[in-house]
Amino acid sequence: MPAKELSPIEIYKMLPGTNCKECGETNCMAFAAKLVNREATLEECKPLLEPDFADAYANLWALLKPAVKAVEIGVEENAITIGGEYVLYRHEFTYFHQPAIAVDVTDEMSDEEFNTRIHVLNDFTYNYIGMDLTLDILSVRCTSGDSAVFAEAIQKADELTRKPLMLIAHDPVVMEAGLKIVAEKRPLMHGATKENWKEMAELSLQYSCPLVAYASNDLDTLKSLALTLREYGIEDIVIDPGTQPTAYMEKNINNYTILRWDAINEEEEGLGYPIMGSPMAAWAVEEEDPVLNEWNEAVLAGILITRFADMMVIHGISGWSLLPQIILRSNIYTDPRKPVSVEPELVVMGTPNEESPVLLTTNFALTYYTVANDIENAKIDGYLLVVDSEGMSVESAVAGRKMTADTVAEAIKDSKVEDLVKHRNIIIPGRSARLSGEIQEESGWSVSVGPLDSSGIPSYLSEKWNPYPE
Amino acid sequence: MVKETKLNLPLSRDLLEKLAECQEIELDDVEIEIEEIEFDIGGGGGGFNTQMMQRMAFEFSVMRDSANRMVQMFGGAPMTAPMPQQIQPIAPVKAKPTQLIPATTTVPDLEYVGEVVEVKLGATKSEGGTRSVSYTIGGEKAPAFYNFHTKPKNRPVIALDVFDWPKVKLSKAVKMHFREVLEDTGEWAKICVDKYGAEMINLHLLTIDPLIEDAPPKEAVKTVEEVVEAVDVPITIGGCGDPHKDLAVFTAISEKIQGERLLINSVTLDMDIEKSGKLIKEYDNTVIAFTSMDVNKARELNRKLYDYVDKNQILMDTTTAALGYGLDYAFTVMERSRLAALKGDPELNHPLSSGTTNAWAAREAWMKMGPEFDPRELRGPIWETITGQTLLLAGVDYFMMMHPAAVKALKEMIDNLMNGANPTEPTDWVSIKVGGS
């Protein structure tokens, strides 16, 4: 189904119009606006659940549902949702669910390797603008072909992690051996192929677990599988078009783009399911050095994050390759409707006195948090003057004339920092050095040019700063 | 066959009598459990009795109505299923498919009316210059690498940064590749082309900066001449960001070095657009129109340049922010510009340029972090690579880069996207043998 561009009016007309405020909004129009932005759910409108509005409810539900179905893997507080997307390009609305990253283990790995990998999955975390970025799913692959061995691996995996599982076994007998152990945790089953789909479909129904349809580099078979599974009565489907190594990047981009384009734009349904990708395909190529496999895997992951994957399986677990992946997906899945900026104001750091330094930064959230963290961690007492750069970083704000001598002088004046400190010496970011003369002229303050990166602030303050330069 | 009618209500006679006395009954903590209801719907001769089915469907809807009323009486939420408008014969239970339902994937049928203009960079001997190669970029008729619709007409081009100031601040992972040539701009350019595969040289004239050395324009001309001599690829001339000084330097260079179809980096809204524009036009050079992450500003600058410059002399740079430091903005502004161009916007249909080197502004690209993020020598270049390839997917045609490994990786990516190789045997990632076994 094409993702409809909805107006609040359109939705408003179908609501009960009682203005009862039961949803927490002041009136139905406000609730309609929230619905259009997917910030509220239909079920919050109690009158709509009355029998009289059953038709309206059904119609609204169809209008508001995402073009890509949201599929939940795992249970309760450990569950993760993938898919649930509405648009092809992020600026048309926003993307909702970051592609989940699954870490690969096999049932033939040594205990040490198996445990280490799960340990990384459990513990890897990176704090980025106040968010903890983590890894999401454990993918347990049967390479042994043996039910007992697979079952044992599943048992171990279940004991070692609370993250949702993906069970990978294309032999239905092996799959069932795994399901018998963890089915109540609702693992994702990988998967149904053109050979085994009937047995897998039965298992998916019997154990109520979501199921992957898989056909490598064959979109027609993939669609065929997805349609057949749905007809079979399976609702939670994930589609896997296979991922080819980097030499076939064009194929990858074609496959993922066509699948998502069809889900968003096609009138007929059939491909409106989360898409999974496997950057670990980069490990299928023999390289001189495994570092190259891991590099290519990160590159592949980067492409798939940008081009529509809702979930990815990776093998490499080095920090240098994981870091760009988790930050890229955080960036791409940031809501473009909301400016990533903080309030421009004077922030008090620690317990400053009238001799404490005054530092300047911009109101781009990332710049602000980075600078503020560095100051906080060094336990510096001072004032941080956040100038309104329309949410741009220092470098861009200077280049784009969003931060100028005028805006800085004005910020100094408005902040009333002159009542708080006796000196008149402001430290500006190294990347805005070119403004130093003009700021001095406009504000009447003397200007000290600070370090290029805020990690240098502590040593700068202890070595170079003097509130009263001659 | 007629079955005995059974009605078993486990209510005592006592209770029934008490109930009969009341007008209204309130029930607390009541649970109604029905384990199984068995219906015999066989007609006299077997098979479905449609009349009977319709009758039953009707009875069911009546039951549900009263059940709903009951639930509401007890203060609960009613059932939300839609009420049947009319009684329809019940369809037989859908049988599970026994074989795969055939399907064909729809290849998106896209119609784009716009087309990105083509811009030629550099000039060979036969074209009036001295370069051994020139490049044409742009010309797209579809979003980046929608190859199922249209293959890109031209290959994106990668330039390497060269600075005329040895004290330029470079990250350790970058500097190690250029340590020998920092003092010699010509040699620096040469190593980029010969050793690191630069397709163009992106020369930054930092020394002209009034805050650095304030070198006069004629010094800058000399530096450019050195580079022109040292390498035979097309050259980009980068200013220092001071609108007045840059224009003076660009003018001196354009007058002295003619016929090479240089790329002037850049013209901004706060420069003298008329003088800059006329300069580009008169000496038949090309220009990067630089704006800061704002589609409307990009439009405005292009519109102003059109008064003096031909469309096919303009690239647009809407600012590159590093992965983790605003890449999402940079990506979206570029993607929006390109999609607008393809939909026919006549003021945005220019090849896109990216200062991918900005990736190094991200501290994760160069900073010492915990051992779990080592080595920095990989973390930096992968940062630049992923910043670059993400913008490649937004439509960038011209990259200005820094680290040799990132250049190599992005070139490989472009190769793989342009060549369109199809695997003879699809990779089955599920059966990859990797890791201890």
Image (spheres, coloured by chain):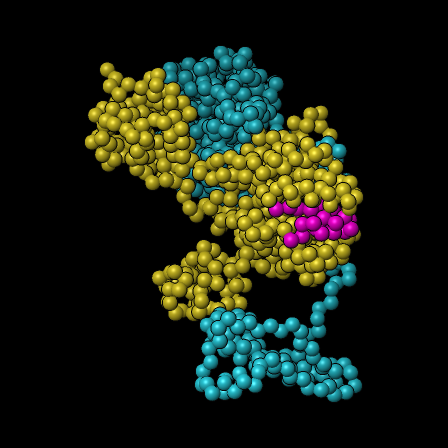
Chain colours: A yellow, B cyan
The residue that appears at 70% across and 49% down in the rendered structure is A181
The residue that appears at 35% across and 16% down in the rendered structure is A463
* Residue B304 shown left or right of residue B259 in the figure: left
The residue that appears at 63% across and 80% down in the rendered structure is B57
Residue A155 drawn at (x, y percent)? 69, 44
Which range is magenta? Answer: A163-184
Q: In which quarter of the image is residue A152?
A: top right
Q: Can residue A251 be seen in this view?
A: no
Between B325 and B342, the one lying in front of the other is B325
Q: Can residue A331 be seen in this view?
A: yes
- Locate the N terminus of chain B and report the quarter of the image it occupies: bottom right
Q: Is residue A301 magenta?
A: no
Residue B296 drawn at (x, y percent)? 41, 43
Q: Is residue A173 magenta?
A: yes
Between A120 and B289, the one lying in front of the other is A120
Tell me if residue B330 comes above or below residue A39 in the rendering. Answer: above
- Locate the C terminus of chain B and report the quarter of the image it occupies: top right
The residue that appears at 28% across and 23% down in the rendered structure is A447
Q: In which quarter of the image is residue B156?
A: top right
Residue A288 drawn at (x, y percent)? 71, 25
Tell me if residue A308 comes above or below residue B160 in the rendering. Answer: below
Tell me if residue B390 comes above or below residue B178 in the rendering. Answer: below
Tell me if residue B235 comes above or below residue A236 in the rendering. Answer: above
